Image (cartoon, rainbow, N blue to C red):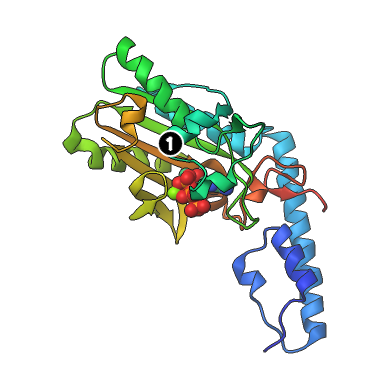
């Protein structure tokens, strides 16, 4: 039982989002394998066409847009206010996040010119809004954004150059409630998505120091941070806060049992998680 799929067969199965079990099958002979390939490839193509047909007849919207709406509804119901901020940000704003020349994230930034880039994260804009909203609203200030972030990544099944981040923040809560609040916010998001089998793990982040990550079978779905934090000074923020950021494509990948984030992303090759060359 030592004959495995050829690399072309393997690649096709990955494109078609075949299960891990299928991708790891072994055979006695090549002809047995090739017969199995033809059968399984056909089944996956049929399944893909069914999913596209269902999309045409029922949902009519991409899973990414549906999830975005579900999250916005769940969060506004809990008192969070949605904000929409620019995707183009200044080098100065990035530097205030400590992301400057010698920082690991710096080399991942898409620059438009010497002073402006596409945002690799939502935090600088949310920090900016916090400062004004603190004057205008009572604490705690609860805001969130769902928007595109851009990072140069070497390709892999978990990373996209453009992905959709949800960043959920609460500013001005009692300091001793921060940990519990982060757990509640993580649970709120994961319940809304429909993933219950997740863990919270301590991590150390290049931007935020020690963070609490939301993890599913070793895959990072979200990262959280809390303040007071060394960066806060730069933004004129002195109150305690918590914040948590999720990648929507990763959430969908886990929810839909798919093998890569590409199938859930902004795409010309996938629709509704289905590869279009079927
Ligand atoms: P990783 O270590 O997996 O590269 P990260 O720690 O750099 O992720 P964060 O800056 O903590 O990512 O961003 C918060 C969330 O955004 C991550 O938990 C992940 O779900 C998502 N995310 C980050 N980078 C990408 C990417 N390139 N493509 C898709 N999702 C991403
Ligand atoms: Mg992280």
Instruction: Give how far across and how far down residue 214 sits, in percent.
Output: 39, 50
Instruction: Give how far across and how far down residue 170 sits, in percent.
Output: 32, 29
**Residue that appears at 53% across and 41% down:** 248
Q: Is residue 136 above or below residue 144?
A: above
**Residue that appears at 60% across and 71% down:** 21
Residue beneath label 1, please?
97
Secondary structure state at the residue bearing disc 1? loop
Cβ of disc 1 within 8 Å of ligand 1?
no
Instruction: Give how far across and how far down residue 92 sits, in percent.
Output: 50, 29
**Count of labels shown?**
1
| Viewer-nearest residue: 122 or 187 | 122
| Viewer-nearest residue: 213 or 61 | 213
**Residue that appears at 77% across and 47% down:** 269
Instruction: Give how far across and how far down residue 137 sits, in percent.
Output: 31, 13
Whether residue 180 is visible: yes
Q: Quadrant of residue 23?
A: bottom right
**Residue that appears at 80% across and 70% down:** 8
Q: Residues within 10 Å of mark 1 (few under 14, many from 20)?
A: some
Q: Is residue 197 above or below residue 101?
A: below
Q: Please identify the residue farthest to the top as the structure is shown.
A: 136
Q: Is residue 185 above or below residue 79?
A: below
Whether residue 187 is visible: no
């Amino acid at each position: 039982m030592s004959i495995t799929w050829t690399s072309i067969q393997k690649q096709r199965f990955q494109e078609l989002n075949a299960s891990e079990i299928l991708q790891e099958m072994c055979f006695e002979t090549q002809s047995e394998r090739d017969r199995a390939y033809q059968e399984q490839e056909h089944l996956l193509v049929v399944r893909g066409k069914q999913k596209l047909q269902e999309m045409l007849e029922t949902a009519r919207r991409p899973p990414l847009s549906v999830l975005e709406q579900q999250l916005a509804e769940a969060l506004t119901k809990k008192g969070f206010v949605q904000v929409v901020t620019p995707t183009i940000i200044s080098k100065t704003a990035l530097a205030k996040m400590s992301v400057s020349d010698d920082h690991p994230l710096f080399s991942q930034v898409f620059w438009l010119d010497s002073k402006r880039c596409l945002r690799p994260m939502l935090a600088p804009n949310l920090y900016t809004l916090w400062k004004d909203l603190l004057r205008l609203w009572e604490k705690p200030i609860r805001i969130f954004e769902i928007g595109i972030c851009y990072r140069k990544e070497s390709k892999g099944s978990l990373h996209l150059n453009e992905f959709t981040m949800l960043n959920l923040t609460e500013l001005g809560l009692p300091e001793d409630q921060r940990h519990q609040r982060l757990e509640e916010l993580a649970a709120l998001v994961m319940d809304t998505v429909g993933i219950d089998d997740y863990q919270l793990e301590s991590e150390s982040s290049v931007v935020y120091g020690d963070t609490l990550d939301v993890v599913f079978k070793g895959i990072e779905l979200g990262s959280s941070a809390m303040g007071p934090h060394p960066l806060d000074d730069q933004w004129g923020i002195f109150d305690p806060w918590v914040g948590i950021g999720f990648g929507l494509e990763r959430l969908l990948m886990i929810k839909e049992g798919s093998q890569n984030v590409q199938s859930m992303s902004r795409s010309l090759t996938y629709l509704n998680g289905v590869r279009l060359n079927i």
